[in-house]
Image (tube, grey):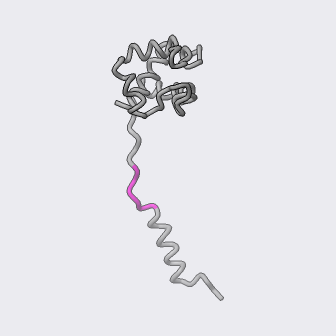
Amino acid sequence: MNYLTPARAFLIVLGLSLAGCSEPEEPAPTLAPELAAGKAVVDKTCIACHGQGLNGAPILGNKKMWGKRLPQGEDVLVSHAINGFAMEMMPPKGGNPDLTDTEVRNAVRYMMSLVQ
C-alpha cells in the first residue's frame, strides 16, 4: 500500500512552500544606546530581584508596582539603586559592587522605560 500518492506529495510540497509566506514579524524596537546598556545590566544583575519581586522589588514592566516609585523621580531612584534602600531591602548597586554609577543609572532608566 503506497501512502505517498502524487496528490499527497503535491500537498506536502505546497504546504512547505507556503509555510514561509506568512507576514514577517515586527522587528523589536531598537533601544537607545544607554537603554540597551541598561538592559544588559538588568538582564545580568537586577533581574534576580526585579524579575520576581523579591524583597519588595517592583517587577519589571509592572505599572502598579512602579506607580508609587516613578513620582519620586529618576535621581531618587538612582540614589536608592546606587546606595541601597534599607526599607525595601535593596542592596547597593543591586549587590554588584563592580557596577559603575553610570551603569546603575542606565539600568534604572531602562526599568523606568518599561512602565512609562
* Left or right of residue 46, residue 62 in this image: left
> Which quarter shows the N terminus?
bottom right
Nearer to us in this view, 73 or 27? 73
User: In the image, what residue occupies the spot 39% across and 13% down?
Assistant: 75
Q: Which residues are magenta?
A: 20-25
Q: Residue furthest bottom?
A: 1
Residue 48 location, quadrant: top right
Nearer to us in this view, 63 or 37? 63
Q: Residue furthest right?
A: 1
* Left or right of residue 115, residue 38 in this image: right
Q: Main secondary structure of the magenta part?
A: loop
Count of numbered tags: 0
User: In the image, what residue occupies the spot 37% across and 27% down?
Assistant: 67
Residue 76 location, quadrant: top left
Residue 46, position as x, y percentages in the image: 53, 26
> Which quarter shows the C terminus?
top left
User: In the image, what residue occupies the spot 50% across and 67% down?
Assistant: 16
User: In the image, what residue occupies the spot 40% across and 53% down?
Assistant: 24
Residue 56, position as x, y percentages in the image: 51, 26
